Amino acid sequence: MSGGKATATDLKARLRNARVLVVGDAMLDRYLFGEVERISPEAPVPVVRVTREEYRLGGAANVALNVKALGPAVMLMTAVGDDEPARKLEELLKTRAVEVTLGRDPQLFTCVKLRVIGRAQQLVRVDFENQPDHEVLADMLSDFARVVAQYDAVLFSDYGKGGLTHIPRMIELARAAGKPVLVDPKGDDYGRYAGATVITPNRLELAQVIGSWKTEAQLEERVQRLRESHRLDGLVVTRSEEGMSLFDDAGHLQVPAQAREVFDVTGAGDTVIATLAAMMACGMGLREAMPIANRAGGIVVGKFGTATVSYEELFG
């Protein structure tokens, strides 16, 4: 960041006064840590003797937590089941002072990702999930329309779990209210995100939509065509060791990767878009916010599992 101490102090105050609305697919990340000392006699797999269990916020809940860690007030809007994982999710959010509006669907299994860790590496992941009921999602759309004007930026975290069925209408409402709209996309139908301020696919996700590219010129030509056809102000692509690229009306801005040591990429995309949203909620433009988000991503990949980056880590 440029501008010295006064500017840093000003930004910190602006972040504390900002409000971000996060909407999307929340998950509960459950970790089982243990010792691996033998192979099972039943199948050629390791036997893990569990010694510790840990719960963390995942998906849109991790995005909301990442926004909160930088200072802004945040509201998470998501659909959950009427089950123990939903109660655990709500408890974790309250502990971290993240405000939440939960659409409860008794038929829904709150999404849980169970990871078994042995010898400091992930051995297996087990997912529990199904699709939410349309009536619950319609109620969420009504809740969204009622509160969107109270926030400085709107962030959609799409993990393809069905919670963002009404995203085209939500984007329309947010833009009509004059709010910047950020989307972490999923799948190959980016038409759902038409009219957003910015979408943030990673390199592989983008290739699913525009095809693989051989040159930077080819990448830029295809992305700008996609951006224009979907009325996007900008598109930010996270490119792992190649850093990040922003495509907007001014062209192509690339910043190099800043990771000192890559330990775990889980949730790095969450941190990047959360940082972009926090900065844009303060009135920053994409070109100013992207290098800061790139720095945040470089910090978080040095941590284990879904994690956050604090203001002090980012600007200290």
Image (cartoon, grey):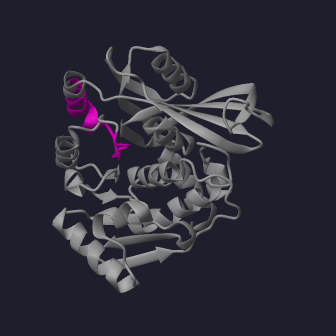
Q: What residue lies at 29% left-to-right and 72% top-to-bottom? A: 223
Question: Is residue 272 a member of the stretch shown in magenta?
Answer: no
- Region of the chain picked out in magenta, as a range: 139-160
Q: Residue at x 55, y 45 (%)?
A: 70
Q: Position of residue 250 (x, y in %)?
A: 31, 78
Q: Position of residue 194 (x, y in %)?
A: 20, 56
| Residue positioned 54% across, 66% down in the render | 240
Residue 49 at what x, y percent from top left?
Answer: 76, 27
Q: Spot the residue most to the right.
A: 37
As drawn, is 236 to the left or to the right of 4? left
**Residue sitting at 66 percent across and 50 percent down?**
312
Left-right relation of 286 to 257: left
Residue 305 figure quarter:
top right
Nearer-the-camera pick, 228 or 309: 228
Q: Quadrant of residue 45?
A: top right
In the figure, 156 relative to 204: above or below? above
